[in-house]
Image (cartoon, rainbow, N blue to C red):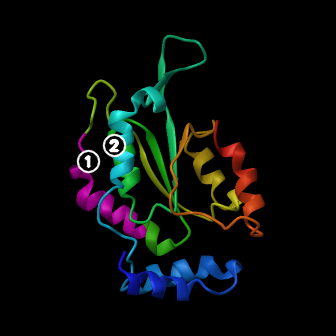
């Protein structure tokens, strides 16, 4: 991101943290200033999925000690247009993209229809995972967790991939972020 763009974002988000939800929605609604949208998945995520399988494991696991495998689930909070969600699904994860902006969720769905073919299945034996985009506030799981549960994913997420949703240490939202441990392993 170029310095002028970073400065503009810093200025936009210089007010109270409690107002950030509305600011993200304003950016997506206007659609004319999205410097964080690179147009492709994060290369570090793709590299990790390919080169760090020993660390991350595969996209499937054995269910409750049985011989049957189930798909692992992945959550991408602040998923933008959903590029990382589509990538994770191509590796076999049932992938959930969470966005605070309803407009961003719509853009995710459009991206999936328009460019989903750019994310070929990586392992034919596993196949593609499910792709779901959900509107909600990551720091308040009551706004979205029910949507995930209604899709048959009552278990916790196996992978949460985040590099955009954060709150500064000591911020009033940080305790909510920490208490989101019920979302992961």
Location of residue 62 in the rendering, given as x and y in whole percent from the top left corner: 51, 18
Residue drawn at the location 39% of the way across and 44% of the way down: 88
For the residue pair 27 and 162, the one nearer the viewer reads as 162
Vertical comparison of 157 with 63: above or below: below
The N terminus appears in which quarter of the rendering?
Answer: bottom left
Q: In which quarter of the image is residue 109?
A: bottom left
Whether residue 22 sits left or right of residue 169 in the image: it is left
Label annotation for residue 47: 2
Q: Assess whether mark 2 and mark 1 are in contact (beta carbons under 8 angstroms).
A: no
Residue drawn at the location 40% of the way across and 33% of the way down: 52
Total marks shown come to 2
Location of residue 128 in the rendering, given as x and y in whole percent from the top left corner: 33, 37
Location of residue 22 in the rendering, given as x and y in whole percent from the top left corner: 60, 81
Q: What element carries label 1?
A: loop
For the residue pair 96 and 77, the one nearer the viewer reads as 77
Residue at the front extreme of this rendering: 3
User: Badge 1 local density, few (<14 within 10 Å), some, or many (20+)?
Assistant: some
Residue drawn at the location 32% of the way across and 65% of the way down: 110
Label annotation for residue 119: 1
Label annotation for residue 89: none
Location of residue 84 in the rendering, given as x and y in whole percent from the top left corner: 39, 53
27 in the magenta segment: no
Q: Give the range drawn in magenta.
A: 106-120
- Of the numbered discs 1 and 2, the one sitting upstream in the chain is 2
Whether residue 95 sits left or right of residue 135 in the image: it is left
């Amino acid at each position: 991101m170029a310095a002028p763009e970073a400065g503009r974002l810093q200025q936009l988000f210089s007010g109270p943290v409690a107002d950030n939800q509305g600011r993200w929605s304003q950016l997506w609604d206007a659609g004319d200033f999205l410097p964080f949208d690179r147009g492709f998945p994060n290369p570090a995520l793709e590299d990790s999925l390919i080169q760090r399988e020993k660390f991350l494991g595969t996209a499937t696991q054995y269910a409750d000690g049985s011989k049957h495998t189930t798909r692992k689930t992945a959550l991408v909070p602040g998923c933008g247009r959903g590029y990382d969600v589509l990538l994770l699904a191509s590796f076999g994860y049932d992938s959930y993209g969470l966005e605070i902006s309803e407009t961003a969720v719509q853009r995710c769905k459009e991206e999936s229809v328009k460019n989903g073919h750019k994310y070929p299945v990586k392992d034919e034996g596993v196949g593609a995972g499910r792709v779901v985009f959900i509107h909600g506030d990551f720091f308040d799981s009551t706004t979205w967790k029910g949507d995930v549960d209604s899709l048959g994913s009552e278990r916790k997420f196996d992978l949460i991939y985040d590099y955009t949703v954060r709150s500064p240490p000591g911020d009033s939202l940080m305790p909510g972020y920490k208490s989101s441990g019920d979302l992961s392993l």
